Each structure stands twice: as structure tokens, then as C-alpha cells.
Amino acid sequence: MTSPRTTMPNRRPILAPTGPAPYRRANRARAFQDALFREAEAEAAVAATAHELLADHVRTQAPETAAIEFEATLASDRIHALWANPRDLRYPTPPLFWRRAPMLSSDPAWLKKAERLLPTVLLGAHLSLIELAGHHPNRHLLSLPAPDVAAALASRIRRAFPQATALLLSLDARPRFITVQVTNIVGPDGASLHAIPTEHDWAAPPAQTWWRLNKGHVVRAVRHLWTHPDHRAVHFQAQGHHSLMWNQGLQALVLPAIPALAGPH
């Protein structure tokens, strides 16, 4: 008879020989600051995503909504009206799409969802807020992001530079503090289509008027796309080491491949 085969244990070590770890004093202050930074960055990302979701909910009521009028109180934040863009020069008086009835018997679902999101949205930085003067204290107008922020940015730029494929920029990005310096509008071959002047370049030619008129829109879009984790992963490509310029280094903001939309330059 053949004896059953005996399985020998595998004596190969699964770890290399180890010794005691070198002594290193824990830097608790540094660890605490790093944890605070990650918490603040996560809070900013939540606020940015909530801002987009808020816009989605109110646009189920009025698709053209660009701003909401709300009242901030200690108890809650109440949405009172939906408006067109108050800064859009096409409208001498921005259209009012919806006004909350004084005795609204039952809040519709879209309004309940929007008002639950509003406190989270207001935790974000760099929001476009206007305080409304008049008989209603604590009333504000909050601008909403475009339905597709990256597409709206690409469209705005391609109205003036049809071949634009990216922005070259530098970021000083910390929670609640994002400074953006756009240096170039870049074409498909990687060459500059338009160099953006610095703040102190007073001798810039008249063609730089485009940047002065569009800077606010562009910078707000860049900040939003950077803060929102999904957009940051899709649209930003690092162009070198952080030490090249500011703390995030040179970044290429790659524009989606859509044509310019109709509208004023």
C-alpha cells in the first residue's frame, strides 16, 4: 500500500526579520493641524457638492433660475424667491420666476430639499452673496452654479478664443482660501493663445479688456471646480512640482470639448 502523502508545513517566513523600530517622538501638534486641514478641506468639498445639488432642486421648479433669495435666521434658512442672474446685463430688471406665498399651506418637495441643503451650502467659501437692502433684514441673494460649471466656463472662453483647450494657472489653495492666478489661455498644440496680464500690468493693451470683464466669472468657476472633488479629478492636470509657483504648482484646467454657446461676449 502507498502511504498517504504527508503535507509539510511551509516554513518560509512571511516577514523579513524585524528589529525594534527606531524611537521617534510623535509630533502631536503637527498631526492635529493635519487632521484639521483634512476636515476643513472635506467640509469645503461637501459645501461645493451641496451647492450644485441645491441648484438642481430649485431648477426643477424654474429651469432658468440663477439666484435664490433667502432669509437667514437663528432658527432656519428660508427660500423666498427664485431669480434670474442679477448681474446679467440682458435684463435691466432680472425676471422673478417664483415667489413664496405668504401663507404657503404645504411646502413642495423641491423646496424642502433645497432648504435642508442651504445651511451646508453656506459653509462654503467664495460664495456670490448679495445682501438685500430694504424692509426685510437678513435677506440675501445667492448665485447658483451653472448646470455644468466646466461647460459654461469653456463656452465663455471660446466665445473669444474658439480654439481654447485649457487654462494654465497657479493655485494657492487652502480651506476657505483659494487664490487663483490664470496665466495663459492655451490652444490644442499647447501654445498660448492669450497671455493674461498680472494685476500690476497697467500697460496692458486694449485687448486685455476681455479679461477685465470676464475675470470674476472665470475665477469663481476655477475655485468651484477645484473645491469639488469630482471636478478636480477630471479637469485639473498638474504641470510640475509644487515649488514652481504656489502651493499647488502649475495646473492645466482642461476644458471640455464643447462649442461656444450663443450669447453676448
Image (cartoon, grey):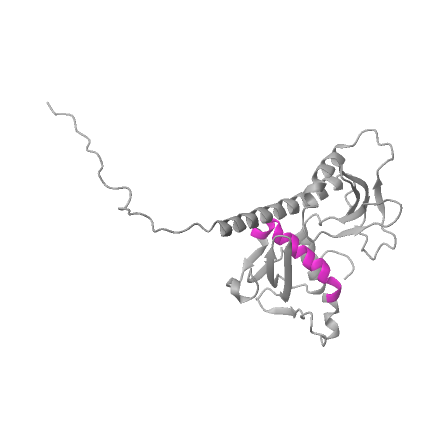
Residue 212 in the image: state x and y as whole percent.
74, 66
Residue 102 lies left or right of residue 77; in this view the side is: right
Is 23 included in the stretch rendered in magenta? no
Instruction: Look at 61% across and 69% down and name the residue there.
Output: 192
Q: Magenta-highlighted stretch: main secondary structure?
A: helix
Q: Name, please, the residue furthest toward the left.
A: 1
Residue 189, position as x, y percentages in the image: 57, 66
Residue at image location 61% in from the left, 47% down from the top: 45
Res. 258 visible in picture: no
Question: Is any part of residue 13 visible from this angle?
Answer: yes
Q: Quadrant of the C terminus?
A: bottom right
For the point 85% across and 54% down, which residue is it?
91
236 relative to 141 in the view: left or right: left
Residue 82 rendering spot, x and y as whole percentages = 81, 43
- In this rendering, would 213 be left or right of 46? right
> Would you say residue 232 sits in the magenta stretch?
yes
Q: Nearer the viewer, residue 114 or 90?
A: 114
* 244 relative to 143, above or below: below
Question: Image quarter for residue 2?
Answer: top left
Q: Which residues are magenta?
A: 212-233
The residue under the point 69% across, 61% down is: 157
Q: In the picture shown, does residue 3 fall above or below 145?
A: above
